[in-house]
Image (tube, rainbow, N blue to C red):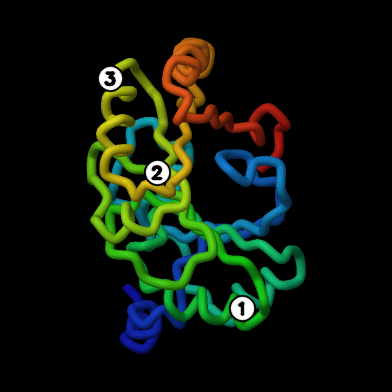
């Protein structure tokens, strides 16, 4: 149990349950191949069975960390920061994003969009999940829609999501890693037949980097 002072700080966004932070190459989606500092926030109740960071789900396992410390670490490494999880929008992101922007950092997010949008984002990557669909505010501001393809039905889900997202969002289909060999050829064929979509691959896994 957190004491009341820490609990209040977490609720305000002055502290966040930090799982890990690391400097690496962006592996997925529009910014693939670019350097970025990743901030992984603990806590997620979306519950994807194929999630490759299930250790992020329980926020209580990840110590509340002062936002000032997170920002100080980030500015040492890169001019682009990616906030991910877990599901970062379970928490109030206003404090974190405003302090990152004060340091002239570009601030990106990767989110399921299942919670109301907080914070100010230079790039909003929406990766919707069937278990808990995005809220309208996430569809409205998404720069990028990234749908994970685990089975053939996910193509139908992808089109349903593309119909809801704003018209400027860039559309990506990405194979779920354990189904990579099976789904990638289907994605390639689908994109060739439906060229509004692009292929996204988890290139960081091919490169064996975080």
Cα separation, mark 2 vs mark 3, equals: 16 Å
Q: Quadrant of residue 9?
A: bottom left
Q: Let me know if residue 66 appears in the view.
A: no
Determine the residue positioned at 41% across, 31% down: 148
- Residue of label 1: 69
Q: Is residue 52 visible?
A: yes
* Residue closest to the eye, 56 or 93: 93
Residue 127 placement (x, y as % from top left): 40, 43
Q: Is residue 141 left or right of residue 73?
A: left
Q: Please give the name of the residue rendered at 33% of the width and 79% of the height, measured from the top-left corner.
A: 11
Which label number is shown at residue 136?
A: none
Q: Are marks 3 and 1 in contact (CB under 8 Å)?
A: no
Q: Earlier in the sequence, mark 3 or mark 1?
A: 1
Q: Which residue is mark 3?
A: 153
- What is the CA distance from the residue labelled 1 to the residue labelled 2? 28 Å
Tell me which corner region of the image, top left, top right, bottom left or bottom right, holds residue 161: top left
Of callouts 1 and 2, the N-terminal one: 1
Q: Position of residue 129 (x, y in %)?
A: 31, 40
């Amino acid at each position: 149990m957190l004491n009341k002072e820490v609990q209040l700080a977490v609720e305000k966004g002055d502290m966040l349950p930090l799982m890990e932070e690391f400097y690496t190459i962006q592996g997925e989606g529009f910014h693939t191949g670019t350097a970025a500092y990743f901030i992984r926030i603990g806590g997620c109740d979306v519950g994807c069975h194929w999630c490759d960071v299930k250790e992020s789900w329980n926020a209580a396992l990840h110590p509340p960390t002062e936002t000032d410390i997170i920002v100080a670490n980030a500015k040492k490494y890169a001019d682009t920061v990616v906030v991910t999880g877990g599901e970062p929008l379970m928490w109030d992101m206003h404090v974190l994003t405003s302090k990152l922007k004060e340091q002239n950092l570009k601030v990106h997010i990767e989110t399921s969009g299942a919670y109301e949008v907080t914070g100010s984002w230079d790039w909003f990557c929406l990766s919707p999940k069937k278990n808990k669909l995005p809220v309208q505010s996430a569809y409205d501001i998404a720069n990028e829609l990234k749908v994970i393809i685990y089975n053939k039905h996910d193509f139908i889900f992808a089109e349903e999501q593309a119909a809801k997202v704003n018209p400027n969002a860039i559309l990506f289909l990405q194979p779920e890693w354990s189904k990579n060999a099976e789904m990638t050829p289907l994605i390639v064929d689908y994109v060739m037949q439906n060229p509004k979509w692009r292929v996204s691959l988890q290139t960081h896994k091919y490169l064996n980097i975080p």
